[in-house]
Amino acid sequence: MSEEQPNNPLHGITLEQLLTALVEHYGWEEMGRRIDIRCFNNDPSIKSSLKFLRKTPWARTKVENLYLRMAAKGR
């Protein structure tokens, strides 16, 4: 079952929600500049990015960290 995670700032946020918020805030071009991965730089889409990030832990960590920095600044 699901445990409470009061100290996890990403608790309750899906990868799709996180990625959508980043794209709305930064746009694909800036995301590709900040995190140089092909799914952000070549014909980017939420669907292709989610597929890549779910299979690539190091890239997902970078995206999550960018989200946390954005959230800390209050958007």
Image (tube, grey):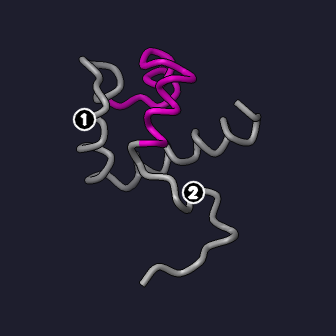
Q: Amino acid at mark 2?
A: Leu
Residue at the disc numbered 1: 47
Other-residue count near label 2 (Cα within 10 Å), few / some / many at <14 / 14–19 / ≥20: some
| Kind of residue indicated by mark 1 | Lys
On the image, numbered disc 2 is attached to which residue? 10
Residue 5's quadrant in the figure?
bottom right
Is residue 36 within the magenta segment? yes
| Rendered image quadrant of residue 51 | top left
Circles 1 and 2, Cβ within 8 Å, touching? The answer is no
In the image, residue 25 above or below residue 19: above
Q: Residues within 10 Å of mark 1 (few under 14, many from 20)?
A: few
Q: What secondary structure is the magenta-colored segment mainly?
A: helix
Give the magenta-colored segment's residue range.
17-37
- How far apart are the alpha carbons under marks 1 and 2? 20 Å
Circle 2 — which element? loop
Please state, as top left, top right, bottom left or bottom right, where the C terminus lies in the image. top right
Residue at 69% over, 69% down: 7
Residue in the picture at 30% in, 52% down? 54
